[in-house]
């Protein structure tokens, strides 16, 4: 087996580049991939739920208020 095959995990398999945890930068663990722990995964989920991740745009936010209905 060549060095390239050993680094990729076997013949014909592409090499995966290991990246750090997106929350803290530590090495990722397969069980929590791409995170290093359940704690970092939960922190990321909290950011999503609190709408901490946003994409910048020039559009105005939609007006979510609805006009009050007149009582008849």
Image: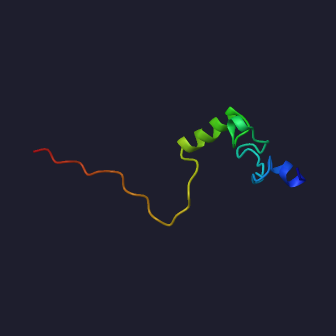
- Left or right, 45 with respect to 28, comes to left
Query: In front: 17, or 6?
Result: 6
Instruction: Find residue 36 and report its image quarter.
Output: top right
Q: Residue furthest left?
A: 72
Instruction: Find residue 27 and report its image quarter.
Output: top right
What is the count of numbered marks?
A: 0
Q: Residue at x 37, y 56 (%)?
A: 63
Q: Residue at x 63, y 41 (%)?
A: 44
Judge whether 41 appears above or below 9 on screen. Answer: above
Residue 48 in picture, x, y percent from top left: 56, 44
Q: Residue at x 29, y 51 (%)?
A: 66
Quadrant in which the C terminus is drawn? top left
Judge whether 47 appears above or below 39 on screen. Answer: below
Q: Residue at x 71, y 46 (%)?
A: 22
Residue 58 in picture, x, y percent from top left: 50, 67
Query: In front: 19, or 70?
Result: 19
Query: In front: 8, or 72?
Result: 8
Residue 37 in picture, x, y percent from top left: 71, 34
Query: In front: 34, or 47?
Result: 34
Scheme by which the image is coloured: rainbow
Q: Residue furthest bottom?
A: 58
- Left or right, 69 with respect to 42, comes to left
């Amino acid at each position: 087996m060549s060095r390239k095959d050993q680094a990729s995990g076997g013949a014909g398999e592409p090499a995966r580049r290991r990246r750090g945890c997106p929350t803290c930068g530590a090495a990722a663990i397969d069980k929590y991939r791409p995170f290093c722990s359940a704690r970092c995964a939960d922190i990321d989920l909290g950011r999503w739920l609190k709408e901490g991740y946003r994409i910048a745009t020039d559009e105005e936010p939609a007006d979510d208020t609805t006009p009050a209905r007149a009582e008849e």
